[in-house]
Amino acid sequence: MTQTTIQYVGGPTALIEIGGLRLLTDPTFDGPGEYPIGARVLAKTAGPAMAAEDLGPVDAVLLSHDQHPDNLDRAGREYLAAASLVLSTSAAEGRLGGSVRALADGEHVDLPRPGGGTLRVTGVPAQHGPDGSEHLVGEVTGFVLTGEGLPTVYVSGDNASLDVVRTIADRVGPVDVAVLFAGGASTPLIPGAYLTLTSALAAEAARILGARHVVPLHFEHWGHFTQGPETLLEAFTQAGVREALRVPEPGERLTV
């Protein structure tokens, strides 16, 4: 089985290289700053480890959702304008247009690989908060990557539900790599609730998925994250899955 590389850009943004193709998750390339959303403000505390123009060509963007600036900021929107293919939600397709294509739960797109074969990108569910919060947080999607001779890679997007993780595990079986958005996001939108996986929930998700490798994203660089690298290490150790965890440094390129 061929290996996968994941280069951490910052926040929810990473470059995944698999089967000769290059996929970018939720593009965020702004520097630090504030983003008003209604009565609340999200604060970005650090910029990306590299500029968008330094990434090189990308075959597709995996956009979990477009409605929150910590997953798609101003520079990220500019980046999408030149992207050849963006896979996301039906809401994002309606709002953004252009090269954005909705990938509904269970639907897939087969991307041609250099030298033959395809990489299949399948849309899977995500729940950006507690049960019943969908009307507040909006539509979100996750992705599963598969192909002959390739590892199975799950990209969670902003998901806070272990029931969703169980659904995905039942469909695809053990995954080789789980890319989990795991900062324990919390905002006044839903007081006292987590909008993404906490460290403990990420560790349990890794166990449910049978993941050989876990690469967390979206655990730093924004003020509304409640947990980070230290709590991830502690939670994965306590859950007995520490050997699976690879916490990246900004700009680091991991081989998994």
Image (cartoon, helix red, strand yellow):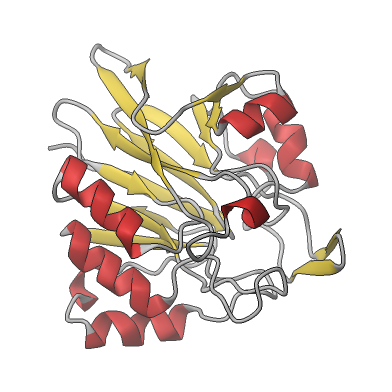
List x then y, in percent, for residue 146. Answer: 24, 32
Vertical side of 114 occupied by 224: above or below: below
Give the residue drawn at x 14%, y 51%.
174
- Considering only vertical position in the picture, is 187 above or below 32? below
Task: Please identify the quarter of the rendering in which residue 191 is found.
Answer: bottom right
Q: Position of residue 38 (x, y in %)?
A: 86, 60
Residue 118 sits in quarter: top left
Percent coordinates x, y for residue 197 in the rendering: 44, 68
Name the residue: 69% across, 25% down: 94
Whether residue 220 appears in this view of the structure is yes
Q: Position of residue 1 (x, y in %)?
A: 12, 37
Name the residue at 57% across, 53% down.
134
In this view, which residue lies farthest toward the front? 132
Q: Is residue 77 left or right of residue 130?
A: right
Q: Is residue 176 visible from the viewing direction of this image?
A: no
Answer left or right for 230 relative to 90: left
- Give whichever of 49, 12 is nearer the camera: 12
